[in-house]
Amino acid sequence: MEIATLGEFGLIRRLTENLELRNASSLKGTGDDAAVLDYKEKKVLVTTDLLMEGIHFDLTYVPLKHLGYKSAIVNFSDIYAMNGQPKQITVSLGLSKRFSVEDTEDFYEGLELACRIYGVDIVGGDTSSSLTGLCISITCIGEADADKIVYRNGAKEHDLVCVSGDLGAAYMGLQLLEREKNVFAGEKDFNPDFAGKEYLLERQLKPEARKDIILLLSENQILPTAMIDISDGLSSELLHICEQSNVGCAVYEERIPIDYQTASMAEQFNMNLTTVALNGGDDYELLFTVPLHLHEKVEQIDGIKVIGHICNTTQGANLIARDGTQIPLQAQGWEAF
Amino acid sequence: MEIATLGEFGLIRRLTENLELRNASSLKGTGDDAAVLDYKEKKVLVTTDLLMEGIHFDLTYVPLKHLGYKSAIVNFSDIYAMNGQPKQITVSLGLSKRFSVEDTEDFYEGLELACRIYGVDIVGGDTSSSLTGLCISITCIGEADADKIVYRNGAKEHDLVCVSGDLGAAYMGLQLLEREKNVFAGEKDFNPDFAGKEYLLERQLKPEARKDIILLLSENQILPTAMIDISDGLSSELLHICEQSNVGCAVYEERIPIDYQTASMAEQFNMNLTTVALNGGDDYELLFTVPLHLHEKVEQIDGIKVIGHICNTTQGANLIARDGTQIPLQAQGWEAF
C-alpha cells in the first residue's frame, strides 16, 4: 500500500495504535504535541542518532525489520554507556516514494521487538516524505541515579581498561555482506551461503546493547570511573576517554578479545586482525575503566576482559604489540564525512 | 571549508564548543554518550520534528540562519502547546556534500539565537553526511507542573474555542516566495521587492512560538481545557481536538483573526481568504479551549481571540459562514505525503 493512501496521520495511527507503555515513567506516549514523562528523583539521560540510507545502511542486504531493531539498539547502547537504563524513544522517519506502508510496518516490528526486549516505550515521533532514501532519527531518553552516572572523563592513572564481548565481528560482517553484494550484483534476492559466518552477520545486522554488563557491574558493586560504548572503533573510543579524562593508556594487542569467526574472516580477506578489532565500528560493546583494586572482581565476570591500564597523559595512548613495541593509537574508525 | 576537512568530531567541536548551558535542569550537555538532565519534581515533556529539504523547506529562498531559527521554534511551539516550558534540544543534521562548514555555522547561529531568546539549551545531537540534501531532526525536552499540563483531549461542551495571533500569513508568505522564485528562475541571488509584505515573509521565514501567550494565560490564572499548536492549519488542529476530546465545535468565519497583509495578498492571488486561514499551515499559533465562565477574562487578553465554542460530538465540527450556513471542517492543511 502506498503511504499516500493513508496520509501522514493515517500512517502514524497505523504504526502507533497498538503501542503499549511499559514504564511507570511514561505518563503519556504518542498522540499529543509532546510525550509526558515522570522521572521523579532520577536524572534524565538523552541521546540521539541519525541514520541515513546509503551512509549508515544499505537496503540491498539489510532487512527493514533488522534495521528497526538496530536503530533502537544503537541508542540504548549510548544510555547504557552512561550507566543508565533506556526508558523511552521517539522515532522520526523520512520516507521516499519507494517505501510502502508495509515497509514501515516491518521497520516498526524490529523497533518494537528491541523495545520489548529492553523494556523501552515508543512515546513519540514524526514521519515525513523524503525526496530520496530513508532517513531515521531516534532519540532515546533514559534514567540514572545521580551518583551512578558514568561519564567519559573520570578515568584515573592506574585504572584498568576493560571491554565487554569481542571486537571486529560487525565490521567483518559488513565486509562479507559487501563482497556478496558485489558478487551477486544485478541478481534479485541474492541468497549467498553464509554457513559458519552467522556470528559476523548477526553482529552487523542485529547487534545487541550490553544491558547485561551494566547489570553485572551493578550486582558486583563495580562503578566504572569512565565509560563509552564502542560504535566507531576501540581506538577512537579509547582516545575519547583519554582526551576527556586527560590521561594516557596502554592496551595490549594480545588481550583484545576477538571471536574465531572474525579471525578466520580477516585471514580470508587478507586483513590485519588487530586493525580490524581496533578500528572496525558497530560493535556496541562497552569500554570502561575501573580502579586497580577491583582487578580480581572485574576479571572474574564473564564477558568482561581487562585489556590494559590508564597511565599519565605524557605517556600517550598506545597499543603494546605482541613483540612489545608501542604503537600510538589513531582514530581510524567510522567517520561520517 | 569542506566538512570533510574537519571530519565529524571536528565539526561537532566547532559547532558546540561555545554552547553555554542556561538552565539548572541541564546538568551535562554535549560531549558524552548522552546529556544529563535534572527535572526534579517537574514532569518531562518530549517532542520531535523532522525537516527534510525539498519537502519542508527550499534553500533557494530560505537562508540557513532563518532555517536554524525556525527549526528550533517549531519544536518549542509543541512544548508550549502542552502548557510547558522548553528547556533543552538535541540537533541532528544530515548534510550532503554541497554544504560547507560555514553553512552549518549559519544554521547554528539561527538555532542559538532562538535558544537564547527562549531560554533553551542545546545539549546534544548527531551529524552525518547525506547522499542528497539537508535533513534536520530536532528533539525538544521541556518541563511542566503535573497539574498544569494541557492535553488535546480535555475540551468540554460549551467551552470557548480561542486562538492566538492571526492565521494564514505564513502560507501567503510561502506563496509569495514561490511566485518570486518562479519569476526569477535561473537568476542567481534573486532580489525581488517585498515592500509591504514584510509580515508575510517574517511569518514564513522567521516565525515565533507563543511563549508570551502561555505566560499571559498563567498570569491571568487561565488553565485551558485543551490545547494544540497550529502547524498544519486551523481546520486540521480543530479536528484533532474534537476527535481526541470526543466533542464537536462551531467556529465563526467572521471571528477568525487575519492580518490585512494576508487579506490583500490572498486577493492578489485570487485565493479564498477563509480557506487560506483555515488550511494554510506553519502559523505556530496556539489553539485552545477554556470554560465558558472565563469568557470576559480571556477576551480581554491582547492577542487572544474567541472564535467559537465546543458543542456535542453529534453536531460535528463546523465553520459558521458569514451568511449563517454551516460548513463541515475538513483537514486540507499540510500533509507530508
Image (cartoon, coloured by chain):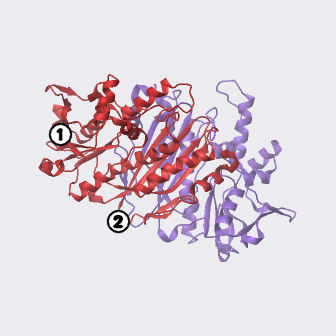
Chain colours: A purple, B red
Q: Quadrant of the C terminus of chain B?
A: top left
Compare residues B240 and B260 and report the one nearer the observer.
B260
Crowd around label 2: few <14 · some 14–19 · many ≥20 (10 Å):
some
Q: Which mark is residue B205?
A: none
Could you tell which of marks 1 and 2 lies nearer the N-terminus? 2
Q: Which residue is mark 2?
A: B41
**B105 lies above or below A57:** below
Q: Chain of mark 1?
A: B
Marks 1/2: CA distance?
34 Å
Give the image location of residue B279, x and y in percent. 32, 31
Q: Residue at x 53, y 50 (%)?
A: B108
Crowd around label 1: few <14 · some 14–19 · many ≥20 (10 Å):
many
Give the image location of residue A232, x and y in percent. 66, 52
Q: Secondary structure at mark 2?
A: loop
Q: Is residue A2 visible?
A: yes
**A10 lies above or below A173:** above
Q: Is residue B259 left or right of residue B334?
A: left
Q: Which residue is mark 1?
A: B310
Q: Secondary structure at mark 1?
A: strand
Q: Is residue A31 left or right of residue B319?
A: right
Indicate the amino acid at tag 2: Glu
Give the image location of residue A97, x and y in percent. 51, 27
Please check whether the numbered discs 1 and 2 fall on a single chain.
Answer: yes
Q: Is residue A281 visible?
A: no
Q: Chain of mark 2?
A: B
Q: Is residue B162 left or right of residue B96?
A: left
Indicate the amino acid at tag 1: Ile
